[in-house]
Image (spheres, helix red, strand yellow):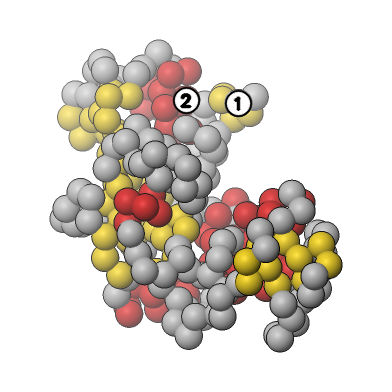
Amino acid sequence: MRINKFISETGYCSRREADKLVESGKVTINGVKAVLGSQAEEGDDVRVNGKPLVDKPSRHVYIALNKPVGITSTTEKHIRGNIVDFVGHEERIFPIGRLDKDSEGLILLTSDGDIVNKILRAEGKHEKEYIVTVDKPVTPSFLKAMSEGVKILGEMTRPCQITRINERVFRLILTEGKNRQIRRMCSALGYGVRRLQRIRIMNIHLGNQAIGTWRELTPQEKRDLGQALDYPMS
């Protein structure tokens, strides 16, 4: 199989991250430096930074974290407050997507590299739901503009669902994930975000889970998620 898939199936990182490791010359297959598209088979001596990969785990880990503000969604160990050290799981896990440092709420982490691409694939249009507090009253014109799409990063965002909760708080459902998208959308319309909390990713709900805690996905959540993604989850 392709080297990026081989690495991701060990739970070391996602395919995308594996490609970066290969491009930077950190991966070898039987002592030969790998390149993008290299093939590896069971029994091959695959190493990253000179260290052999661990065997593929018999059961993947899928967890839901209620991320606090201040924790960074990265596997880079040198970054203080990285999400992997914060969770402290015994398996090698990595976040599915990002939730910026200043935001809080639901983020999924896993040892399954294949499911990362399934969830992040833009054309999937998978829903993510947020509660957002802004610095001034939410107006009908603001709600209309947000729902129809806002120009950020040189292009229009997709239409989205938005509902006013109270004077300065609204609920937003997105089907895309541009960098700091909600903050950029609000800023383009003259609003500043005071609090941003993600409460749902597809069928996974944050519920009343305490901030800073994590839990394993339930069997039903995994079944429903796997069906939505057309992907068998172990």
Where is residue 47 shown, x and y percent of the image?
68, 68
Amino acid type indicated by mark 2: Arg
Question: Please, is residue 187 above or below residue 163 in the view?
Answer: above
Pick the front one: 122 or 1: 1
Which part of the image, by quadrant, shows the C terminus? Answer: bottom left
Amino acid type indicated by mark 1: Leu
The residue under the point 46% across, 66% down is 92
CA gap, disc 2 to disc 1? 9 Å
Pick the front one: 181 or 216: 216
The residue under the point 20% across, 48% down is 211
Q: What is the secondary structure assignment of the residue under circle 2? A: helix
What residue is pinned by disc 2? 184
The residue under the point 32% across, 70% down is 217
Q: What is the secondary structure assignment of the residue under circle 1? A: loop
In the displayed structure, does residue 13 sit left or right of residue 73?
right
Crowd band around label 1 with a 10 angstrom C-alpha radius: few (<14), some (14–19), many (20+): few
In the displayed structure, does residue 5 sit left or right of residue 130?
right
Which part of the image, by quadrant, shows the N terminus? Answer: bottom right
Residue 153, disc: 1
Question: Please, is residue 146 above or below residue 118 in the view?
Answer: above
In the displayed structure, does residue 135 sit left or right of residue 14?
left
Visible in this render: residue 181? yes
Where is residue 142 shown, x and y percent of the image?
37, 22
